[in-house]
Every structure is written in structure tokens, then in C-alpha cells.
Image (cartoon, coloured by chain):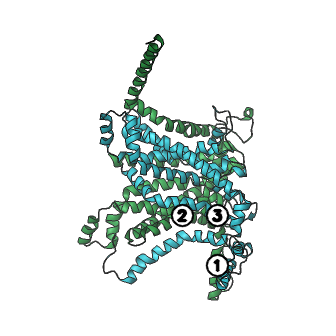
Amino acid sequence: MSKESRAGQITVAWTKTRYNAALALLERPSVLGYLLMLPAAFVIFLFVAYPFAWGVWMSLTNKQIGMPWSQVKFTGLQNYVDLVMNDGVFWTTAWNSFVYTGIATVIKWILGIWLAVLLNRMVRFQRTVRAAVLLPWIVPTVLSTIAFLWIFDPDFSVINWTIRRFYSWMGWGYVKGPLWLGDPTLALASVTFVNIWRGTPFYAISFLAGLQTINPDLYEAAAIDGASGWQRFWYVTLPGIKPITVVVLVFSIIVTFADFQIVYVLTRGGPANSTHLFATYAYQVAMVGSRLGLGAAVSLFMFPILALMIIYQLIYLRREQA
Amino acid sequence: MTQLQVGESFAKRLVAYHLPLFFFVLFALFPFYWMFVTSIKSTHETYNRDVNPYVPVTCVAAIAEQARSLNFNGSALAENCLYHWRTLLRDTLFIRWLENTLLVAIVSTLISLFAGITSAYALARLRFRGADTFGVLIFVTYLVPPTLLFIPLSDVIGDLPFLHKNLLNSPWALIVAYPTFLIPFCTWLLTGYFRTIPKELEEAAMIDGATRIQAMVRIILPLALPGLLSAGMFAFTLSANEFLYALIFIYDAPNKTVPVGVVSELIKGDVFYWGELMSGALLGSVPVALIYSFFVEHYVAGMTGAIKG
């Protein structure tokens, strides 16, 4: 055996030991755990945590699109003060966000439970009907909202055509029909309607999953005790789906409060900036109006509510697990 | 409450059950019917307030005429019914947008699945310091809506410190942005799924001499295939549906994705190409809808699993 190949064997043996040592290290849960978390942690740090901090900083400056760095100045809380003190649209936006979220959430909740109970009672065609009622939630929101834009069209709205036909059929004369997206209140109602249309299936399908975990014996026991249908719904069904209700509500409130697409497509915040939500107003200020710092401040106004919902969710889940 | 009650009269069932269900289905499906009808109408019909808008008159007449004369004429049908569909596919960038959407969705889904699998496995199986904190961090990230971050994120992606290259206006801007919500989603779904697989299977493999990584790749991943598949499908549809980042990060028409392309390029100032808009909206929705309806059971199972877990 030549010297070289012996040396080679020793090196191979050495590399092997090193390799085995590395492998042994990977067997330790602490080492492997951190290693496996690394890709997710990297993305979250670089594209979530860092942008969040960057956004907070931006909101404290006068940064604008295309502004040279030498002119970017730290302005402290000026943007926030400007929004709260001198910006009427901002207050409309804040009001709209709460109204939109509140009304849409309550209606989606009621419709969702109702639809879930109906679906749960279903014997035939359950899969088909379930797929059909799920569609609004599944398809890309902007694409279905385009259909609503045409349904709410000022001149060719199918709703108004139907109202007109109905009036003349009843002999009540000519009626033009409302401008669905032209009046501030009606426009906000229309936007809320589309949100309800899109979100109800999510509630229903989640509640349906919750209903299916309820022990049928409970209904039987309640029936034997003489509980009416409503009582059974109130004392068995609702408590039975409570865990999933909390999760669904928190999730839905976050998504609705931070909604962008429906308003963007239907009204762009109009007429006369009356239907903005925080997200669309932030977009308008930052991307259309180029004032990045001010826009970042607008979107950060969502943060306290979102943080509150997230913390509540965490505490609730922890308590459930314990 | 849950079962059909015996002895309920037909009238009661009609009012309490059939009618509400009928209206729910109508409510859910009407906008899709409306897209379809508008997409096969002639422009003249679309803007005529005197004809019944519920029926695509010209198209129906053409079909009836051919059925009566038993003389099939494809080009006449195309002219009367599929005019806007042809325009959409031939004269707009729709196919390009579809390609972009596919590229972005597939690549960001693969990235997110990889990172989701590794972190979900760590969270479900390994005990290490900080694991709980990581779990909470991922859950919080899952709940952070894109609308909170889009302004600074466009800055960050436009000026990545280690790339010295502007990713904006290219599919890569979306491919790096989408994992921010896809990874937490996949991790969340898969952690629940991994926990349902008995630990003993891995432990047996490791006693037989497999390393932990081998046990994970050879034993756990094949067993978790249904979970991986549904996480991948949902991640795919989530990225195909995404709107805000795609609206802000991409400027040029040929680089857009389907939702942004349809909304921004088929509306020119005050001119709405309704037929093309509606056919584009339908065509953009169909693939996503198909995928979802196959996997919705998994989604619900995953969600309830994660809540219980």
C-alpha cells in the first residue's frame, strides 16, 4: 500500500469523524430545532419585523416618493398630529373602518350560523351545495368585486332595472333607482354588503366544522328534558361552537378591519373620500399622493386594534389548551 | 336540531329549510351568473337598457337558430357569444398575466412549503429553548394583515441590502413577499398535522439506527403527504388571489398578475370593457375554485385541528 493512499485513508477517516460529529450535533433537539426554524425566522425577520420597524420610522419622517435622502427629515409625531388634528378625511376613514367592521361582522356571524345549521341538516347534495355557497369566499376578491361594480353601475345596474320593471308592472310609474355607489351612505352600505357576501361562507364552513364536533347525545338529552328547538340551539349549539366562534370572529375582525380590495375596486374611497378604510386611505396618501411617511402613519393607526385582537386570541388559545 | 326531524310537515320544512337554503345559494351564485351572462353579451346589448339584462338575447337567438336549422356554424356562435372571450385571449395580455400568476404562485408556494415543513416539524416534535416563543411569533405573523406593512415593505424590497438590485416590477418582488404570509400559514396548518402522527413511528425508526432527519424525511413526510398537499394547494390559491402587493410592486402591464391585470388594464380611464372584464374575472376564478372545492375538507380539518392542538 502506497504512502499516498494511506494518507488519503487517514484524511477520509478524519472527514468521516468530523461528519459524524456534525451528524451527532444534528441529533440534539436544540441544535436541530434552531436549524429547522432558520428559514422561517429569516423571512419573518427580514420581510415582516424589519419592515414593521422601518414603517414606524417612516411614519416619523416627511419621506415622499422620489425625495432625495438629504431632504428626508425626522419630524417626530407631526404626521400623527396632522392626521388627528387637521384631516377630516382621516376621521371619516376611522369611523368607516369601525362601522364597516362592526356591521359586517355581526351580519356575517348571524348568517354564518344560520347557513351552517342548514348545511348540517342537509342529507342529499351536501357536497355540491357546500361547494356552491363557498364560492364567494374562494375566488379572488377583486375579480368577484368587479361583478358587483357592474351590478351597482349608475346607469346599467341590474338591481335598478329590476326595481324599474317592478314599479311599472305595479303601475307605480317610472323610478330611476338609487345611485348605489354615488351616495356616501349607500356606497358604504354597498361595500359592506359585498364584504358580507364574501365572508359569510367562511363563517358557515367553520361553524359547520364546529357543529359536527357536538355530541348528538346532548341534543337527545335536551329533547328528553323537553327543550324546544330554540332552547336546544341556545343551550347546546351555541356553547358547542364557542371555541371555534372566538377564533373565527377574531380572525374575521382582523381581516375586515384591514380590508382593502373591495373598497379599492368599488369606490376607490369615493364619492368625495367618504368610503375610505384605513388601508385604502393609506394607499391613497402614500401611493397616489406620494407622501410615504404620512401614509405609513395612516396604516399604523390600525396597529392598536390589530394588536388587541391578536393578544386576545393568544390568551384565549392558551387558556383553552391549559 | 341537527337531524331532520320526523313528522315535520312539508310546509314547515319548506319555510324553515328549503327556502332559506335556496336563497343562500342564489345569494352566493348570482354574481357568477352575472359575470357569465355579461361575458357572452354583445357590447350593444350590454349598453341597452330596454332589453332584459338577465338573458343574453343575441347569443340565445344564435343558438336557437342553429338548433332549429340543424346547421352548426361555429364561427357564427363565436361571433355572437364568445366575442369578448376571444378579445380577452387574443388582444389583451391575459395569457401573460396567467403565466406570471402561475410562476409566482408555484415558486412562492415551494419556498413556503419547505420553510413551513421544517419549522412545523421543529415546533411539533422538538423541545428546545424558545420553541414556544417561535410558535407565538409565527402565529402573530399569520395574523398580521398585508395592509399594515405594504408601504415600508415596498421600500425594503426595492432596496434589499445584500442584493443591490431593485426587485420591484419583476416577479421576484412577489416571490419574496408572498412567503411572509404563506410560511406562517403552512407552519400553522402543518404543525397541527404533524402532531396527529404518532411519535412512536419515528422513535422506532431511530432505534433501528435512522438519524432524526432520516426519520423525518422517510417516515413523517410520506405520512403527512395529504397535509402537505392541502397546505401546498392553499398556499397556491392564496398567492394566486393576492392583490395588494401585486398592485404596488409591479408597474408594467406585461409583468402583472391576473387579479391586478384584469382590474387595472381592462379599465381604461372611464372606459370599462365589461365583456372582457367579466370573462377575465371568470377565467381567473375557475382554477382557484376547482382546487379549493377539492381540498376544502382538509382546510376545515386543518383549522379545527390547529385550534384543538
Name the colour assigned to chain A in the rendering: green
The residue at which mark 2 appears reads as A136
Q: Quadrant of the N terminus of chain B?
A: bottom left
Q: Say what amino acid the circle numbered 1 marks.
A: Val
The relative height of residue A222 versus residue A294 in the rendered view (above or below) is below
Q: Chain of mark 1?
A: B
Counting the numbered discs, the total is 3
Q: Within the image, what quadrant is residue A151 found in?
A: bottom right
Q: Residues within 10 Å of mark 3 (few under 14, many from 20)?
A: many
Q: Within the image, what quadrant is residue A95 found in?
A: bottom right
Q: Say what amino acid the circle numbered 3 marks.
A: Ile
The cyan-coloured chain is labelled: B
Q: Say what amino acid the circle numbered 2 marks.
A: Pro
Q: CA distance from mark 3 to mark 1?
A: 19 Å
Looking at the image, do the residues carrying marks 2 and 3 touch, with CB atoms under 8 Å apart? Answer: no
The residue at which mark 3 appears reads as A146
Q: Earlier in the sequence, mark 2 or mark 3?
A: 2
Q: Residue furthest front?
A: A1
Give A253 or B302, whichever is nearer the viewer. Answer: B302
Provide residue A71's location: percent of width, then percent of height. Answer: 74, 34
Looking at the image, do the residues carrying marks 1 and 2 touch, with CB atoms under 8 Å apart? Answer: no
Direction from residue A71 to residue A28 in the image, left or right? left
Direction from residue A38 to residue B173 in the image, left or right? right
Q: Is any atom of residue B113 visible in this view?
A: yes
> Share a chain, discs 3 and 1?
no
Provide residue A214's location: percent of width, then percent of height. Answer: 32, 61
The relative height of residue A26 versus residue B167 in the rendered view (above or below) is above
Q: CA distance from mark 2 to mark 3?
A: 13 Å
Q: Which mark is residue B224?
A: none
The residue at which mark 1 appears reads as B55
Mark 2 residue element: helix
Q: Chain of mark 3?
A: A
